[in-house]
Image (tube, rainbow, N blue to C red):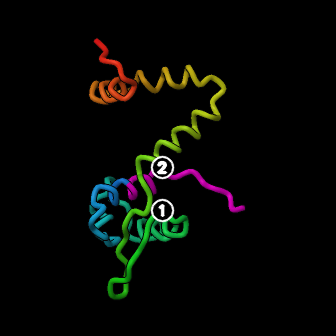
């Protein structure tokens, strides 16, 4: 069974950009323009090929290049990643506590709503 790697930051940013436009298939150049930090075109292209190999994006031919779409539910993917990190923590209570302390007010309100509490 092939080893499953954790998603890197750039992979996550590319998936987020693709999930923002699920109806559109985006080119490497279009994705490059949406990713902060001005990553190189070739870097974006390499990551896209890796994401395609992992089954996380689909691609369609557009002339001599490809256009990409997200092939997975980004929310489920990120939630699974968070759960993986939590599972390996020796003190999950402390990890969750630290995580909650970093939430914005809007994120905290969303979490309270999900948990079925109104909060203060």
**Quarter in which the C terminus is drawn:** top left
Q: Which secondary structure, mark 1?
A: loop
Classed neighbour count for the residue bearing mark 2: other residues with Cα under 10 Å, few (<14), some (14–19), many (≥20): some
Q: Nearer the viewer, residue 38 or 113?
A: 113
**Quarter in which the N terminus is drawn:** bottom right
Q: Is residue 50 left or right of residue 25?
A: right
Q: Which mark is residue 16?
A: none
Question: What is the C-alpha distance between the residues marked 2 and 1?
Answer: 9 Å
Q: Position of residue 34 (x, y in %)?
A: 28, 59
Can residue 10 be seen in the rendering of this structure?
A: no
Q: Earlier in the sequence, mark 2 or mark 1?
A: 1
- Eyeballing the image, is 107 above or below 61? above
Q: Position of residue 66 (x, y in %)?
A: 38, 78
Instruction: Write down the quadrant of residue 28 in the picture.
Output: bottom left
- For this orientation, the residue located farthest to the right is 1
Q: Position of residue 12 (x, y in %)?
A: 43, 52
- For this orientation, the residue located farthest to the top is 120
Instruction: Write down the quadrant of residue 44 in the picture.
Output: bottom left
Q: Is residue 3 left or right of residue 31?
A: right
Residue 25 highlighted magenta (yes or no): no
Residue on which the image places disc 2: 77
| Residues under numbered marks 2 and 1 in contact, where contact means CB atoms less than 8 Å apart | yes
Q: Residue at x 27, y 60 (%)?
A: 21
Classed neighbour count for the residue bearing mark 1: other residues with Cα under 10 Å, few (<14), some (14–19), many (≥20): some
Q: Nearer the viewer, residue 65 or 118?
A: 118
- For this orientation, the residue located farthest to the bottom is 63
Q: Residue at x 51, y 66 (%)?
A: 55
Residue on which the image places disc 1: 56
Q: Which residues are magenta?
A: 1-15
């Amino acid at each position: 069974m092939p080893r499953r790697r954790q998603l890197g930051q750039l992979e996550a940013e590319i998936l987020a950009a693709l999930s923002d436009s699920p109806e559109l298939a985006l080119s490497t150049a279009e994705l490059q323009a949406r990713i902060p930090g001005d990553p190189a075109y070739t870097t974006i292209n390499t990551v896209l090929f890796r994401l395609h190999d992992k089954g996380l994006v689909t691609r369609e031919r557009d002339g001599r290049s490809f256009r990409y779409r997200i092939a997975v539910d980004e929310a489920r993917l990120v939630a699974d990643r968070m759960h993986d990190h939590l599972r390996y923590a020796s003190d999950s209570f402390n990890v969750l506590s630290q995580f909650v302390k970093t939430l914005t007010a809007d994120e905290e309100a969303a979490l309270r709503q999900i948990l079925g509490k109104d909060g203060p």
